[in-house]
Amino acid sequence: MMNTTQNRIERIKNNGYELDFGTVFNHAFENYKKIALYGGLVLFVFFFLLSIVVFGVIIAIFGSAATLEFLKPENLRPEALSLNILLIISAVSILIGSSLSPFTAGLIKMAYCAERDEEFHVSTMFEFFKAPYFKELFIATLLVSIVSSSLSAIIDYAQIPILGFVNTLTVSLFTILMIPLIIFGKLKAVEAIQTSLMIVSKQPLILLGLIVVGTFAIMVGLVGCCIGIFFTFPFLYSLNYVIYSEIIGFDTEIDQEATL
C-alpha cells in the first residue's frame, strides 16, 4: 500500500491542485522572519570558511603566483580560457554544488522547524550529510546540474544570451520540489526529479511568479554592500518549504520521520 505522500502525489497527478499566490507568499514571509537572522549568519560563515578552504587548496596545488595570475580579470574572460580549462571549471563546480546540496536541504529543514516552533541549531544544516539522504541529494543535484550545464553550453555556442537566463529560470522552476521530496517525501533521486517536474507542470505560472518575486526579494540584499544578500537568501528556503507544505503537506507519521 502506498504511503500518504505517494497517495497525495498520485492525486495531484490525476486531479491537479489549487495554489494561491498570496497565501503562499505571505506564509513564506512569516516563516522567513523566524529564520532570517540565524540562517543569514550560518550562510555567511559557511561560505566564508568554504572560500578560504577552496582558495587554500587551489594555492596548495598550483602555488600562489600562478593562482593570482589566473585570477586576473583579463584571464577570466571566457574567450581567454581554453576548452579544457572551461570543462574542468564546469566539472568542479558541478561536483562542489552537488556535494553541498545536503546543506541546502538543511536550510529547508530549518524552515520546517521554525514553522513548528522547534529549536534548530547549526547541526540542523548538516544532518542530511548522512545516509540515505546524501546519496540521493547528490545524485539528483548532479543529474540536474549536468543537464543544465549542457544546455548552457549549447546556448553559449548559439550566442543567444537571453536563453541562458531562460534556461536557469526553467531548471530552477521545475526542480523546486526536488529536495523537499527527498528529505520529507523519502523519494529516490530520479523519482524526486520526475515528481517535481510533474507537480510544477500542473501550476507553472503561479510557481514561476513566486520564484520571480522571491528572487527580486532576495536581490534586495545586494543593497547592503552585498553582505545583506546572506540575510535575504533564507527567504528562498522558506518559499521552497512552504510550496511543498501547501501542495503536498505533512501528516503525523511524516512529521515524526522528518525530525529523526
Image: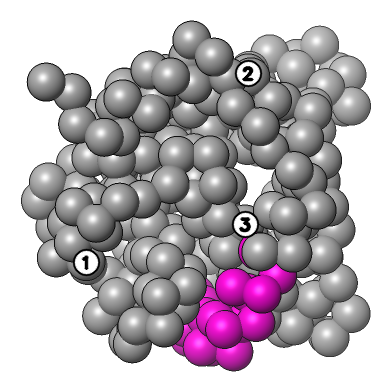
Q: Could you tell me which residue is drawn at 72 percent across and 83 percent down?
A: 227
> How far across and down, in percent of the image, does residue 226 sit?
78, 78
Q: Quadrant of the C terminus?
A: bottom left
Relative to 153, 247 lies left or right = left
Q: Which residues are magenta?
A: 28-49
Q: Amino acid at mark 2?
A: Ser
Q: Is residue 31 magenta?
A: yes
Q: Amino acid at mark 3?
A: Leu
Reading the chain from its start, which is encountered first: label 2 or label 3?
A: 2
Q: Which residue is mark 2?
A: 201
Q: Nearer the viewer, residue 135 or 86?
A: 135
- Location of residue 30 with respect to 195 vertically, above or below: below
Q: Nearer the viewer, residue 149 or 3?
A: 3
Q: Could you tell me which residue is drawn at 75 percent across and 17 percent down?
A: 155
What whole-number distance in Å separates the C-alpha atoms at marks 1 and 3? 20 Å
Q: Which residue is mark 1?
A: 259
Residue 39 in view in this figure: yes
